Image: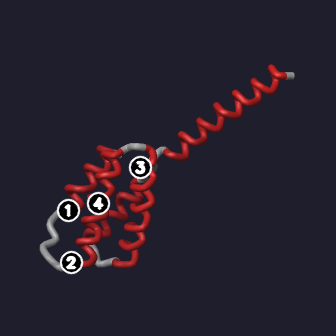
Amino acid sequence: MTVRKNLFMSIFFVLNCFVDKLSTEPNYPSSFLNELKKCFNSEQEDKCKEIILLTESMQLREYYVGNLKCQTSILGLQTELIRNIYFDGVKDNVSGKTIPYLIKNC
């Protein structure tokens, strides 16, 4: 009976760790990256604000995982998105600078 119990618990923990690992993997599909580029290039404030909220949850997830490079890249991206929305100024090619770091570090 204890052998069955130990086997069941071992299988449960292995599967639980596997599912947890899969759910914490960052998933940045090309559609997300395309939306980011559109946000930097156009005046879609509502969509950009949604992306800021999404990136907030992404950077918190990376913090809890301990992936500080990715978290820092996401924080930089958030900063540039906020600057793009709320501050009228020189809008240089920010997406060309921040998105490659996001891809590299995450």
Label 2 Cα crowd, 10 Å radius (few <14 / some 14-19 / many 20+): few
Q: Are marks 2 and 4 in contact (CB under 8 Å)?
A: no
Dot 3 crowding, Cα within 10 Å, few <14, some 14–19, many 20+: many
Q: Position of residue 39 (x, y in %)?
A: 31, 69
Residue type at mark 4? Leu
Q: Quadrant of residue 19 in the image?
A: top right
- Kindly identify which residue carries mark 3: 62
The alpha-carbon separation of the residues under discs 2 and 3 comes to 27 Å
Q: Residues within 10 Å of mark 1 (few under 14, many from 20)?
A: some
Label 2 residue SS? loop
Element at label 4: helix
N-terminal-most mark, 2 or 3: 3
Q: Nearer the viewer, mark 1 or mark 2?
A: 2
Q: CA distance from mark 4 to mark 1?
A: 9 Å
Check disc 3 and report its element: helix, strand or loop. Answer: helix
**Pointer 4 with pointer 1, Cβ within 8 A:** no
Residue at image location 34% in from the left, 48% down from the top: 70
Closest to the observer, 74 or 31: 74
Would residue 10 appear left or right of 92 to someone viewing this image? right
Return the residue found at the far top. 3
Q: Which residue is mark 1?
A: 94
Q: Earlier in the sequence, mark 4 or mark 3?
A: 3
**x and y percent of residue 76 in the render?**
26, 58
Name the residue beneath numbered marker 4: 77
Q: Say which amino acid is labelled 2.
A: Phe
Task: For marks 2 and 3, give the one nearer the viewer.
Answer: 3
Which image quarter: residue 99? bottom left
